[in-house]
Image (cartoon, helix red, strand yellow):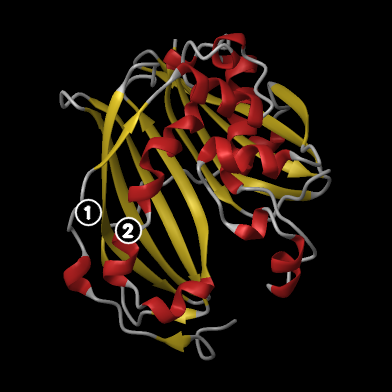
Amino acid sequence: MTESTARLVEFDDSGLETWCDDETFAVTAERIAEYAAATNDPIEAHLAGKIASPVFAIVPVFEAMMMPVIDVAPMDIFGRVVHGEQDFHFHRAIQPGDELVSRAKAVGYTSRSNGTTITILIECRTDAGELVNEQYLTAFFRGVDAGKSVGQAAPAHKFDEALRAQEPVAVVPQHVDLDQTYRYAPASGDPVPLHLDEQVALDAGLPGIIAHGLCTQAFASWAVLTEVAGSDVHRLRRFAVRFAKMVFPGDDLETRIWKVGSANGVTTYAFETVRGEDVVLSDGLAEITD
């Protein structure tokens, strides 16, 4: 869809920079272990519920993360929204017994030729106020033109195409199980029927049930941790992706990882997850302490 055929929609600037109400979440070892199993995570500490895997960070913030979008975008275009990007910034790993408090706000929107993105900043803290992680969620409204760009976008994490001249440092084969979405939905708290009901997916114009994008991101996270971080989630400082294509139950995937460089005790890696020739997770970025 080009700019000339995009629907012009007025966004509400007064909804920017307004924190939503706090959402609380009690972390248990059982929920950590359930999430690890639902994402085929092979790391024993995650499966045992001793420490949370990286993308588990979405679970405590799930109720808060989309609330600010309603303050900016009109409700009648929500049928056009997709999860565009997710960027985690970790201060420490989540562990059993944490009592977490999350809040979110829209910090800006950007009008593009094919649609408009809204950037949501999410904060997750302990009930004592310790910052556990920050997240940038980019919501993309297909075929919607807000007519302008306001505020800030999420931090960049663009893949450097020059890296393709190098062999990746690791290539990890992965498989999406036929029951993956039915396990992931309760573990994550994401009940969206496109992932669970074949007829709903078909009625939406899809070829069938689609996998949760964050489940695919979780696949990529354990690939990166096992290959270049000694399976130690405590070393991961940032983990960002763009959701490029849909993934389906039964898909065979491959996560490819390149080393970008090191500075100040942190090594940066670029990665992508592919299905054959299709890139399903693009612009992957991981920052790992040495």
The quarter of the picture where the N terminus appears is bottom right
**Residue 53 appears anywhere in the view:** no
Q: Residue at x 52, y 79 (%)?
A: 143
Classify 10 Å Cα crowding around label 1: few (below 14), some (14-19), many (20 and above): some
> Measured along the vertical axis of the image, is residue 110 above or below residue 185?
below
Image location of residue 208, percent across then percent down: 78, 61
- Residue 134 falls in which quadrant of the image? top left
> Decide: marks 2, 1 in contact (CB < 8 A)?
yes
Disc 1 is placed on an element classified as loop
Q: Residue at x 39, y 17 (%)?
A: 95
Q: Which residue is mark 1?
A: 20
Q: Residue at x 17, y 58 (%)?
A: 18
> Given the image, on which type of amino acid does mark 1 rest?
Cys
How far is disc 2 from disc 1 in space, using C-alphas?
7 Å
Q: Residue at x 47, y 21 (%)?
A: 52
Classify 10 Å Cα crowding around label 2: few (below 14), some (14-19), many (20 and above): some
Name the mark on residue 67: 2
